[in-house]
Amino acid sequence: MGTEAVLGSAPRRAGGADPLWSQTADIIAGRVERGELAAGARLPAERELCARLDISRVTLRKALAHLVNRGVLTSSHGRGWFVTAAPAAPEREWPNDLESFTATARRKRMRPGALVLGHEVVPASLDVAERLLVPAGTPLLRLERVRTLNDVRIAVDLSLVPVALAPGLEQADFATASLFEELRERGVQPDRSVVTIEARAADRALAAELEMAEGTPVLVLDQTVYGRDQRPALLSTLRYSGERYRLRTTFQPR
């Protein structure tokens, strides 16, 4: 059994800061990364954590669940929450696992942000319906955002999700919320994605949104994300500024 970890330092609550659960998760993850919380250590009881951090249990559990998804913590029913004993994955710019823009930003210790360009329910076209394996005309949440890192415009993200797949998703505030996290809260677990990557030149509209010159190279990632039932859960097209984003990965022989 691992020793019990010690926590302190309540999350900041300044206006415009990240959500309180995200601040809480960052505090715990930071202590793990600095070695202040050792692998295998058990966190204090939830009631004690809430008192130390001055947060509600709902906020705490959302932070802890997020850290479990990131692989920072593990949970054991009836025993509590533990710092994962697995070694941390090497730093990388192109994730080998399925990771949202928000999660990637936090892993790289940057502040994610979003400017919502469009947030509406629309009928699925024939082409989109075919990719999502739903009838044409199916109501979809169409969400378009400019994604930022530390307030710098990095990409324009267009996502399409069947409304019936995650009821209430269209009510979320995506100026601050993560689409993947909102899906998980509604029982949809993104499991894998099939991605096509290509280079294009920014048209006038895209260039304006990313505050760059028309014709500037952009990297386009078009992906279909599948849930654990292996059915398509969402379509996403991310158009990154080629001058502000780089992908790096490692290929190994099989």
Image: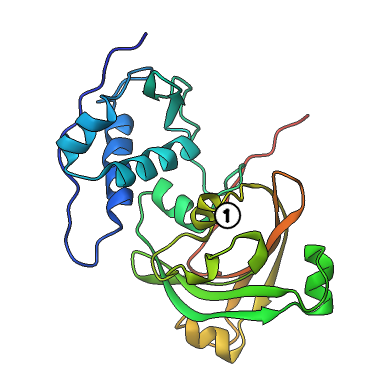
Residue at the extreme top of the image, as rendered: 1
Figure coloring? rainbow
Residue drawn at the location 46% of the way across and 67% of the way down: 172
- Pick whichever, 151 or 185, lies toward us: 185
Residue 106 in the image: above or below residue 176: above
Residue drawn at the location 70% of the way across and 33% of the way down: 252
Q: Secondary structure at mark 1?
A: loop
Residue 46 in the image: above or below residue 26: above
Q: Quadrant of residue 202?
A: bottom right
Q: Amino acid at mark 1?
A: Leu
From where the camera sits, is residue 235 visible? no
Name the residue tied to disc 1: 247
* Screen quadrant of the N terminus: top left
* Screen quadrant of the C terminus: top right
Residue at the extreme bottom of the image, as rendered: 204
Residue 34 in the image: above or below residue 40: below
Residue 38: give x, y in percent of width and height.
32, 20
- Pick whichever, 89 or 140, lies toward us: 140
Q: Quadrant of residue 229?
A: top right
Packing grade of label 1 (10 A; few <14, some 14-19, many >=20) is: few
Horizontal side, residue 217 vs residue 151: left or right: right
Residue 147: give x, y in percent of width and height.
46, 69
Residue 176: give x, y in percent of width and height.
38, 65
Residue drawn at the location 28% of the way across and 31% of the way down: 46
Residue drawn at the location 47% of the way across and 39% of the way down: 70
Horizontal side, residue 176 vs residue 232: left or right: left
Horizontal side, residue 137 vs residue 199: left or right: right
- Pick whichever, 143 or 57, lies toward us: 57
What is the count of numbered marks?
A: 1
From where the camera sits, is residue 46 visible? yes
Residue 77: give x, y in percent of width and height.
45, 22
